[in-house]
Image (cartoon, helix red, strand yellow):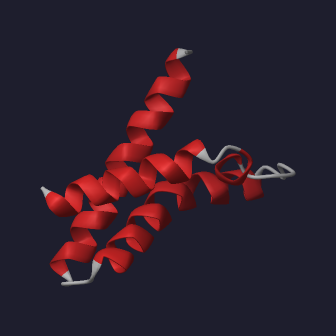
Amino acid sequence: MEFISIVDIIGTIAFAMSGALRAIEKEMDYYGVAVFGITTAVAGGTIRDILINKDLPVSLANPIYLIISILSAFFTSIA
């Protein structure tokens, strides 16, 4: 793996955890925690890809980012 890929995955985990923590503060259920985790984890990269006129955002082309954000939100909610 390249260094930038590792940093990208670490950032996805961090943002998913922060979104999940915010949803937990708002006393949402597991579905809400997952939605907040996914939204905060992939929204920034999706907006970036749209602004640079990329055909397909990376978060949609590579489902690993969604899987990582769901798992991070889940582990944050049970911890």
**Residue 42, image x, y percentages:** 54, 56
Quarter holding the C terminus is bottom left
Horizontal side of 43 relative to 54 (left or right) equals left
Residue farthest toward the left in the current orientation of the protein: 79
State the image quarter where residue 11 is shown. Answer: top left
Compared to residue 12, the image places residue 35 above or below, namely below
Q: Is residue 53 left or right of residue 33?
A: right
Q: Residue at x 45, y 46 (%)?
A: 68
Q: Is residue 25 above or below residue 65?
A: below
What quarter of the picture does the N terminus occupy? Answer: top right
Q: Residue at x 75, y 58 (%)?
A: 50
Residue 6 is situated, as x and y percent measured from the top left of the image, at: 47, 25
Q: Residue at coordinates 21% horizontally, 83% vertically from top-left?
A: 26
Residue 64 position, x and y percent, is 57, 43
Judge whether 16 appears above or below 25 on screen: above
Q: In the visual, does 29 lie left or right of 12?
A: left
Of residues 62 and 49, which is closer to you in this image? 62
Front residue (pair 68, 22): 68
